[in-house]
């Protein structure tokens, strides 16, 4: 039986109570990355800039995948949450900067309230490690 392994990176805080969840869980060759936001070491990256916030979220995702021994080519699916659907082009541009064709499947949802003031974007991911 494969056990679950918590994957963490130094610049993203884990929940205070581990029972509440994890930023990233590996089970076998599957990697599940919780919604990443544009905070790096506790500081908001790209205030009022949806493109830079998307990039920061994808940087976190890239770091988690690398820590688990993979690359962005292993990412198969993204969920992208935007406070304004008008930020969709920025999300598309950031994805094009980080992923080779064909990029991962993606669900994009606009008009959502996110957990912290100033956030414009949140992105979660799933990867199948080779």
Image (tube, helix red, strand yellow):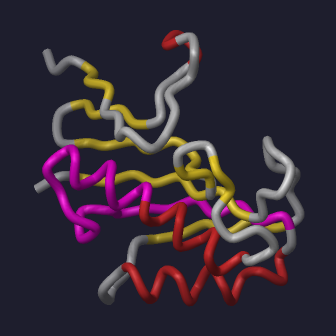
Q: In this view, does 84 lie above or below 86?
A: above
Q: Is residue 80 in the magenta section?
A: yes
Q: From the viewer's side, name the closer residue of 78 and 66.
A: 66
**Label tally:** 0
Describe residue 77's horizontal placement relative to residue 117 as left or right. Answer: left
- Residue at left offset 26%, top offset 42%: 30
- Residue at left offset 28%, top offset 67%: 72
Which image quadrant for residue 38?
bottom right
Q: Position of residue 60 (x, y in %)?
A: 43, 56
Q: In this view, does 20 lie above or below 124?
A: above
Give the position of the C terminus as an image quadrant.
bottom left
Q: Is residue 104 in the magenta section?
A: no
Q: Where is residue 129 in the image (x, y as percent from the top left)?
A: 18, 52
Describe residue 48's horizontal placement relative to residue 4 as left or right. Answer: right
Which image quadrant for residue 25?
top left
- Residue at left offset 30%, top offset 86%: 100
- Residue at left offset 38%, top offset 79%: 98
Q: Where is residue 29 in the image (x, y as percent from the top left)?
A: 18, 42
Report the magenta residues as a range: 60-83
Describe residue 79's horizontal placement relative to residue 73 as left or right. Answer: right
Give the position of the N terminus as an image quadrant.
top left
Describe residue 20's horizontal placement relative to residue 117 as left or right. Answer: left
């Amino acid at each position: 039986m494969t056990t679950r392994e918590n994957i963490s990176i130094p610049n993203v805080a884990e929940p205070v109570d581990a029972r509440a969840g994890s930023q990233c869980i590996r089970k076998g060759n599957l990697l599940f990355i919780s919604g990443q936001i544009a905070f790096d070491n506790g500081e908001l990256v790209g205030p009022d800039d949806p493109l830079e916030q998307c990039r920061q979220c994808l940087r976190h995702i890239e770091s988690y995948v690398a820590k688990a021994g993979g690359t962005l080519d292993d990412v198969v699916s993204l969920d992208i949450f935007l406070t304004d659907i008008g930020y969709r082009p920025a999300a598309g541009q950031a994805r094009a900067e980080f992923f080779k064709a064909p990029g991962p499947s993606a669900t994009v949802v606009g008009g959502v309230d996110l957990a912290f003031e100033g956030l414009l974007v949140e992105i979660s991911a799933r990867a199948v490690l080779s």
